Structure formats: structure tokens, C-alpha cells
Image (cartoon, rainbow, N blue to C red):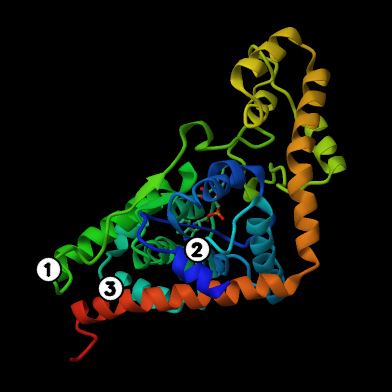
Amino acid sequence: MSDNLSTSLKTRKILLSGVKPTGKPHIGNYFGAMKRFVELQDVYESYIFIADLHAITTVQNREELVNNTINVVLDYLAIGLDPKKVCIYKQSDVPQVTELAWIFNCLTTVPYLMRAHAYKDAVANGKEPNVGLFDYPLLMAADILIQDADVVPVGQDQKQHVEIARDTAEKFNRIFGPAKDGASETFKLPEPLILEDVATVPGLDGRKMSKSYGNTISLFATDDDIEKVVMNIVTDSSGEHPENVYAIHALLKDKELLDNLYKENKGKYKILKEMLIDDLQDFIRPIREKRQKLEKDKDTVLEVLREGGRVARERVEKKMEIVRDKVGLKLS
Ligand code: TYM
């Protein structure tokens, strides 16, 4: 695998993204971002990681973090990411990322970071955010910029974070100038890749699907779980059709076909829910079964991370040599 991975990551444009190991992934994560990782693995040179350092802003339990981290790798493999094509790694296996985040800390003002949504939401909800949560966007900027990412496939909720990465790249380039050869800026400006239709996948209650709202459908839910959660959806009967049922169904079915079905079954909420259950079960079953097979082979997961970490570290070290030189942390 090692030779294959290094040689297949060559001169195409670079894609980078990550998922936090904070719990079970849901279909919002999948349709909003993860599906794109798979679709684009042959198009871009791809770096997909598990954001365990971001996760510890909230998960502070060893067992839970270890299990969640392994689970995200299993999820990646089950949805079809191919470790021979994509560099899959664990964020904390690439310590240069935290080194770069510190450099960014020193370029960024506190009032600027206070405008970040995640921090503002935490404060608005009466939480006392830890420093890690406050600094979250700069660690994310380091993730993105250290790999020279051109595109970052994410859901709408991460758009501001990619903008902060762009601002940070611009600021660094402005202060420290282009790389030594004069050929290019030190950091590229990354673009978020957000698909309009699935920018914010709604949850069971119509709000954004989110682990923290408890309104999710797990990407690996059992047939029974799917039936239970869909039957428990509280439907809103004020519009043409039950909006939240329709919105989830629209992820799985062609719009024209779906509109016809909803027209034919107007007002028959139970039948519409049953159709959604069938479609969800058909969509989730094969990936759940693939994941169950993969679960038996934990060594493969660890090997994927070992190899991905090695490739990622080697690559970013070259970038950090340039950065340290620009900043004056390298003396020759
Ligand atoms: P995380 O783990 O919260 O979510 C993973 C991805 O799923 C997307 N997503 C959604 N998309 C549409 N509708 C929804 N309801 C929905 N819920 C979640 C998220 O936008 C995300 O793309 N900060 C990131 C992890 C991260 C990262 C990075 C991503 C760390 N460093 C660098 C990209 C680049 C996060 O918390 O994702």
C-alpha cells in the first residue's frame, strides 16, 4: 500500500477535509460532506483526516475518543474511501499542525476570533468555552493551509471556518511575504466546496441535523432504528406536504419522482413515512453491512492510519520548513 499511496498522490489539485470523532456520523455529515470525499477521490489529490484534536474540545474521555476515532476510519472505508488513493490520517499524528496553529495564534487578534459562530453560539447558550473551542478556527486553518488545499468540501456550517483560513493565509502572506524562491505565496487561498442542495441537511425536527440537537439519523442505523425514528417524526401539516419528511426524502430520490409521489399521497402521512423508511433502509443497509465486515479487522484500520500519518507528516514537514524559515524560527 505504501508505494501506491505515495505515488498516486501527485500533481492534481488538492482536496482536504475532516470529520470530528465526537459520535456516530449522521446522514447530514454524509450528504453534506463525506459523500463528496468519495466522489472526488479520483479527481483530486485527497487528504481526509480524523479531527481528534478538535474533538477534545468536547470529548474528554479516553475510551470514547479512541472508539470514536476508530469508528470514523471505519466510516470512511465503509462509504468507499480507498486508502490507496486517499491519504487518510489522524490529525494528532501530524504534530506540525499544532505548531502552525500556534504561529497563526500569534497573528490573529482576540476580537477577530470572537466573531466566529461556534464561539458566539457557545457564549449565547450560556456555556463557558474552553480556550480550545475559542481557538478552534485557527487549528482548522492550520489543517487546511499546511496541506496547500485548493478545495475543502464541507457543509454550510463550516463555511466561516474556511473563510477564516483564507483570511489567515492572506495575513501570513502579507506579513511574511512569498516563499523564498519568489515564485508563489507561502499559503494558497482555499475554496469551500459546498453543494447548495445539501449545504444544510435538516434533521428530524427540521432544524440543522446535528449531534448536539439529538435530531439525527445515523449513517449506520439498523432497519429497526430507521423505522422508529421516522415514525416518531413530528410532522408539520401547514404546508403542501410534511416538510421535514420531504426534506429528508429529497436526499434519496430524484425531485420529480418525489414530487409525484407526494402529490399522489397528499395528506397520507403514514404512507409517506413508510416510503421514506423503505428508501432509507435500502440506502443505509449496504454501507452498514460493509462496515460490519470491516469492524472485524481492526489491524487494517490501524495500518491505514499508520501509513496515512507517515505520508501526511512527510509532506507537511516540507511546508513547515518554509514557514519556519519565513517566520525566523529557522536560523540558517
Ligand atoms: P463535523 O465533524 O462537525 O462535520 C463533518 C462534516 O459534516 C458537515 N455537516 C453537515 N452538512 C450538511 N448538513 C448538516 N446537517 C451537517 N452537519 C454536519 C460539516 O459541515 C462537516 O463538513 N470542524 C469540522 C472538522 C474539521 C475540518 C477541518 C473540516 C476540522 N478541521 C479542516 C474541513 C477542513 C467539523 O466539526 O466537522
Determine the residue located farthest toward the bottom in the rendered image: 332
Is the residue marked 3 within 8 Å of ligand 1, measured from its CB? no
Above-or-below relation of 111 to 35: below
Q: CA distance from mark 2 to mark 1?
A: 41 Å
**Where does the image place residue 321, in percent across and percent down from the top left?**
28, 80
For image coordinates 61% across by 71% down, the residue present is 304
Ranked by sequence position, the earlier of labels 2 and 3 is 3
Query: Where the N terminus falls, by quadrant?
Result: bottom right
Q: Residue furthest left?
A: 182
Q: Is residue 146 visible?
A: yes
Report the residue marked by disc 3.
Answer: 106
Marks 3/1: CA–CA distance = 24 Å
Q: Is residue 101 left or right of residue 227?
A: left
Spot occupied by residue 86 in the image (x, y as percentages of width and height)? 52, 61
Of the 4 image quadrants, the one containing the C terminus is: bottom left
Q: Secondary structure at mark 3?
A: loop
Kindly report which numbered mark, 2 or 1, lies closer to the viewer in this rendering.
1
Look at discs 2 and 3 and give the one toward the viewer.
3
Q: Which residue is depicted at the point 48% across and 64% down?
A: 133
Marks 2 and 3, how far apart at CA: 20 Å
Front-lying residue, 297 or 225: 297
Where residue 209 appears, x then y in whole percent? Answer: 62, 41
> What is the three-letter code of the residue carrying label 2?
Pro
Kind of residue sitting beneath label 3:
Cys
Q: Which residue is mark 1?
A: 182
Q: Are marks 3 and 1 in contact (CB under 8 Å)?
A: no
Which residue is the site of mark 2?
129
Q: Secondary structure at mark 2?
A: loop
